[in-house]
Image (cartoon, rainbow, N blue to C red):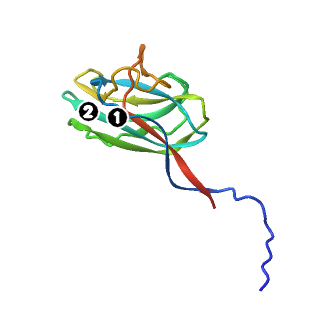
Amino acid sequence: ATVVVQDQSAPTARCTVGFLLDQKQLSLDGGVIAFETMGQSFTAGSSGTLAKVRMNLRSTVINGTIAPTLEIQAGEAINAAVISSVESIPMATTQSTVEKWFDITFTTPAEISAGNKYTIVLKANSSTGDELTSLASRRGAGNTYPDGKLIFPTSSNPNDIAFETFMAEDIPV
């Protein structure tokens, strides 16, 4: 049998088959920090599609409700351009959620470049906007991730919250 190949162009579509760890800060020994809005910056180690983030979080709901979200922003700030979809964090909206690791996969992932800074932005989106209804995360003691920092609306902190970033592992189709 003879096979004739007429189109030898490279495939244009890609299929995600898994996730590859890119950046991480796993230390939980620096205590808990509660917030309404907070960011953790990181420096991308790889270029490509940032498809998933893993965060150690909990929530406190004493007054009102909570609808927490996570997004990726360009640069090292919490009021910059959003470059990913805004994803809901699967927590109860009317009661507190115990501390655990959450895997958040982006519907529309961010395209990032190695060596550039980006920020994981977390928002409690509480109905009250106070400390009685907030998100919280454990942080490392000291500067446990030197390639980023903890960012608040009006300040930053050398401590880092626990996180992992994952790149999409794609194959051409």
- 26 and 100: which is toward the camera: 26
16 with respect to 7 (left or right): left
Pinpoint residue 55: horizontal percent, then vertical percent.
37, 37
Q: Amino acid at mark 2?
A: Ser
Residue, disc 2: 59
- 151 and 164: which is toward the camera: 164
Residue beneath the point at 61% across and 35% down: 113
Q: Amino acid at mark 1?
A: Pro
- 45 and 119: which is toward the camera: 45
Pinpoint residue 165: horizontal percent, then vertical percent.
47, 39
Q: Residue furthest bottom?
A: 1
- Crowding at dot 2, Cα within 10 Å, few <14 / some 14-19 / many 20+, comes out as many
45 with respect to 156 (left or right): right
Is residue 94 among what the camera can see?
no
15 with respect to 165 (left or right): right
Asked whether disc 1 touches disc 2, contact meaning CB atoms under 8 Å apart, the reply is: yes
Residue, disc 1: 68
